[in-house]
């Protein structure tokens, strides 16, 4: 398996990005990671699902990197999932292609962590907003890994940004060694 990890970066304007651009560069620096820049690959927003399914077939791990926009991912990542995770491949009759693959979100938020609480601006912990992704993973029989979150992404100290980039690199290096899971506890 040439590249066991697919790292999908979904940011509509990486040129203006601080955090996600740095994390995409971190991922690119790790050997054996295929980095897919979604907005660069699909500027017309039309995702080639068949091509993407082939891209995923030989991977053991999918990592989705994105900024939180209105409590979710930027639109093209939704479109990528919609077009790619198709019936008969991701789920349904003979839909076993994703079964056992590892799945991790790597997220940047604008707000601080304390804003994601019952007393905070956003009322709920961030994990609650990630439920559709978690259940998508479970529905397709994937192995949900703890998300990597970078809070307060535009206002954090440079040292924190660099440290998080290193953390991401270390996580990706570990993920390269992680085989697909044979028995899925939460399969579809
Ligand atoms: C359209 C839009 C919606 C956003 N919605 C949220 C949000 O719901 N929660 C939040 O914490 N930050 C939100 N943000 C802030 C971004 O998450 C933040 O700017 C981004 O993670 C910073 O990463 P970057 O430097 O790579 O752009 C939003 C930003 C934009 C442009």
Image (cartoon, rainbow, N blue to C red):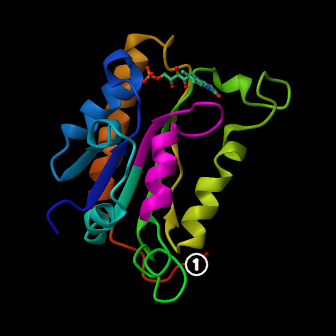
Along the viewing direction, whichever of 164 and 104 lies nearer the viewer: 104
- In the picture as drawn, the residue positioned furthest to the bottom comes out as 93
Give the quarter of the image for residue 176. Answer: bottom left
61 with respect to 88 (left or right): left
User: Across the whole image, how many numbered discs are drawn on residues?
Assistant: 1
Whether 88 is drawn above or below 132: the answer is below
Whether 128 is drawn above or below 26: the answer is below
Residue 127 among those drawn in magenta: no
Along the viewing direction, whichever of 173 and 60 lies nearer the viewer: 60
Q: Position of residue 129 (x, y in %)?
A: 69, 43
Q: Position of residue 20 (x, y in %)?
A: 39, 28
Residue 70 among those drawn in magenta: yes
Q: Position of residue 118 (x, y in %)?
A: 84, 31
Seen at 34% across and 42% down, the residue is 38
Q: Which residue is mark 1?
A: 187
101 with respect to 111 (left or right): left
Quarter, ligand 1: top right
Question: Residues in magenta?
Answer: 64-84
The quarter of the rendered structure image containing the C terminus is bottom right
The quarter of the rendered structure image containing the N terminus is bottom left
Seen at 56% across and 19% down, the residue is 152
Give the quarter of the image for residue 159. Answer: top left
């Amino acid at each position: 398996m040439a590249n066991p990890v697919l790292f999908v970066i979904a940011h509509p304007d990486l040129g203006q990005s601080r955090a996600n651009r740095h994390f995409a560069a971190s991922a690119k620096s790790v050997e054996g990671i295929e980095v897919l820049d979604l907005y660069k690959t699909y500027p017309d927003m039309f995702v080639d699902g068949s091509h993407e399914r082939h891209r995923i077939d030989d991977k053991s791990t999918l990592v989705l990197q994105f900024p939180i926009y209105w409590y979710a991912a930027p639109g093209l990542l939704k479109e990528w999932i919609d077009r790619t995770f198709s019936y008969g491949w991701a789920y349904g009759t003979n839909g076993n292609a994703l079964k056992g693959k590892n799945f991790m979100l790597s997220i940047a938020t604008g707000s601080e962590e304390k804003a994601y609480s019952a007393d905070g601006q956003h009322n709920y912990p961030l994990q609650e907003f990630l439920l559709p992704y978690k259940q998508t993973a479970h529905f397709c029989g994937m192995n949900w890994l703890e998300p990597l979150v970078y809070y307060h992404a535009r206002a954090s100290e440079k040292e924190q940004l660099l440290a998080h980039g290193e953390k991401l690199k270390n996580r990706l290096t570990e993920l390269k060694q992680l085989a697909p899971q044979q028995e899925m506890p939460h399969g579809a």
